[in-house]
Image: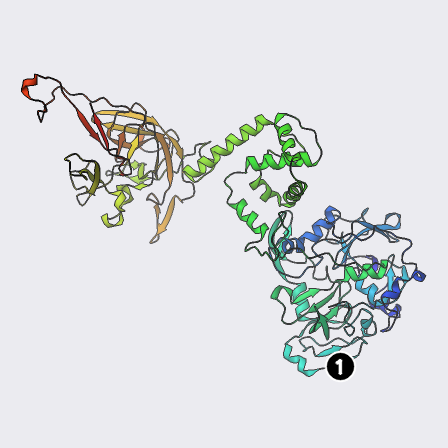
Amino acid sequence: MGNFTSSPGNRSLSRRRLLKMSGAAAGGITLSSLYGSQLGLHAPRFGPRLTQAAPPANEHFQRTWERTDRPVVEGMVSRTWMWGPEAFTGAMTEPYAESPEEMRTVQYFDKARMEITHPDSGDPTSIWYVTNGLLVVELVSGRMQTGDNTFVDRTPAQVNVAGDGDDPTGPTYATFGPLLDAAPLAVNSAIVQRVDRAGNVTSDPALADQGILTGIVDDVTNHSIAAPFWEFMNSSGLVYENGSYSQDNLFENAYFATGRPISEPYWADVKVAGTVRLVLMQCFERRCMTYTPGNQPGWLVEAGNVGLHYYAWRYGDDPEPPPPPPPLGDFCVPVPEGYKPKTAPAAKLQKLAENSVAPSTLASMFFQLGRRYMAGHSPANELEVAAFEAFGNLPQATRDILQCSLEKIDDLAPEVRDQLFDPRFDLSDTAVNPEDLANTLALEIVMRASQTMFGDAECMTEERPGLARVSAGIDGEILFTPTIFRINDLRTIEFRLTLQQYESDELQQVCTVVPIDGDGDGVPDSSQLNCQTQMAPCPGHMIDNVCMRVPEVRAGEMVKLTGANYFNVAAKVRFQIGETTRDVEAHVCGDLETPLTETVDGSERVIRDNRVQDQLTFQVPMDLASGVYMIQVVVPNNTGTGPFPEYFGIYEYIRVVAPPTATFDIASEVLTCIEETSPASFGSDEVGLRIVTVPIELNGTLGAFRDHKF
């Protein structure tokens, strides 16, 4: 920017001197006359003609734009634009004496122009590497800057600073020319000054009711700054930086976006969307700011469209502003007119990423194949041949949606993208390898299964021990007793609850099948299951003579135990029936989140109650005979302390039932006939059998009544 930037550097001319040298006046030619050929505004042309929309032209412009405006585009916040939803030109070059080859790269946005004046010597990490032009200074003064100390004399812009372009009475940039030397208002003064299009300033005491005061007086330009503008220049909010969102100051330097004030703040009557409204406005070097009472909170303070105004003044094009994006971000799939999603697409993606157990292999593959197809690559294998053929058969509108989706994926923050899409698919032009795809998909399935089983996506692929939680034995010896709090989802007696605190399905039920003879022929044709809570004696534990439930599991089935002190991945589950025992291998996923100790009444105590969520899974052996078994977790002692080589807790109970594939033989040594069906004179010794069966599921439901005759 040369001598007029707010960044450090040479200032051979002061800002006020530049403005006074301009001879700016309230009068001047109209905007339409600026486009006359006598001013030579169409030749030479230093940049491409206006485009409808364009992304920031390089990584430096992108970084500058996305800090404040990406959150607005993606619907994360509702506040004024500082640049606009996108640029309305591509990258351009404009003359500037101090830049390499006396040309610098610029790009125009609705609200400003971005510039890189010193690409050869500037620090790319500095906020001042990209500047936004002193466009208001040029529009007010009528002098177009082409170097630190070189200018082209033009005419002050007769363009409305704010509001509708066809408003015949609102202030223009030229209006502010005669007001540059106005004395500053005192700090905390009520702003009651009005200005009209001709630059006439009057005092309206009734404006004090608006409650708008001055904030500070700038020590460089000696102009006050209205409090709403000063507060905005120093405000904080959601910003996007280094690939992620955070709460921070909107501007790393309060003057970065606006520059310093070149006028006092004034009220004016301005036509906005066809309605005359009261607006507070103040021009700064880089932007003219407005405050409109009654606007939504995020839009009370706004920046004028100085980028559009300046482009028209300089090049003679009167660009129509690009259509605004949907208020909650762009959509790749067409949406009905007036559609307003409850949640912004970016917010939905963020939530989806946060809840993602594992990146989606299939989504990653789809978009990788789509990327290669849209880029015109040849298929590298049979999978890509089939995929490219399918893409080729899609309607053009659908392929447009695919291209849009790919662009949206590229715009995602890296950490969000890696949570949604597997990093093994690098989203570049690498071919999709079917073998790698199969391996990645298999790993994803395991991770999702692990999340379902353990609440942790990593536990199934890699065991981890829990913490050793010490207790004292009867004789004071050190113990690390494993405890079972749950068998699958059923709480055990170790949960230490009262009888009333247990659910009914956690208590043992005794059920009886009652045959029902519906048609009265003496033969049952249906049945009813009657159940009641079992009282002692019990097949397992009991509370107040009420039996705790003994879970039924099938041979070959996987069982999960939740408890404490599963501190060794070599832990096993011991089955015992009578005097016979059998140890079964287990898979351990220890709880590393629940603290080892807590402070209670000033004393430190070990946490070993049901808050601990150590988990262990094992498979019931397929060859295990049906029956009620006592089970306990056996943990080898690897703590280096304590007198025992292994630890085990109290028994819990499970009932092993036959697997669904089991078959049964019915054998009997004696058959007793209960009724003679043929006269003795027949001399028959034949026997007829009738077997009635009713299947009962593990959840207690009855199956269809079956009658077998032999």
Q: Can you give x and y, in whole percent of width and height, for residue 520 in the image? A: 15, 38
Question: Mark 1: few, some, or many residues within 10 Å (few <14, many ≥20)?
Answer: few
Placement of the N terminus among the 4 image quadrants: bottom right
Residue farthest along the right direction in this orientation: 38
- Asked which quadrant contains residue 183, the reply is bottom right
Q: Would you place residue 333 above or below residue 688 in this image?
A: below
Query: In the image, 529: left or right of 592?
Result: left
Residue at image x 62%, y 64%?
298
Q: In the image, what residue type sits under mark 1?
A: Thr
Placement of the C terminus among the 4 image quadrants: top left
The residue carrying mark 1 is 202
- Asked which quadrant contains residue 151, the reply is bottom right
Q: Can you give x and y, in whole percent of width and height, for residue 206 in the image? A: 67, 82
Residue 287 in sight here = yes
Task: Work out whether residue 50 or residue 231 is closer to the camera in this orientation and state it.
Answer: 50
Query: In the image, 605: left or right of 157?
Result: left
Task: Work out whether residue 231 or residue 527 is closer to the camera in this orientation and state it.
Answer: 527
Q: What element carries label 1?
A: strand
Q: Can you give x and y, in whole percent of width and height, for residue 422 in the image? A: 57, 36
Residue farthest along the left direction in this orientation: 681
Q: How many numbered marks have been drawn onto this rendered protein structure? A: 1
Q: Would you place residue 634 above or below residue 56 in this image?
A: above
Task: Work out whether residue 55 or residue 536 is closer to the camera in this orientation and state it.
Answer: 55
- Asked which quadrant contains residue 402, the reply is top right
Q: Would you place residue 646 above or below residue 162 in this image?
A: above
Give the image's coloring scheme: rainbow
Q: Can you give x and y, in whole percent of width and height, for residue 389 in the image? A: 65, 31
Residue 428 in sight here = no
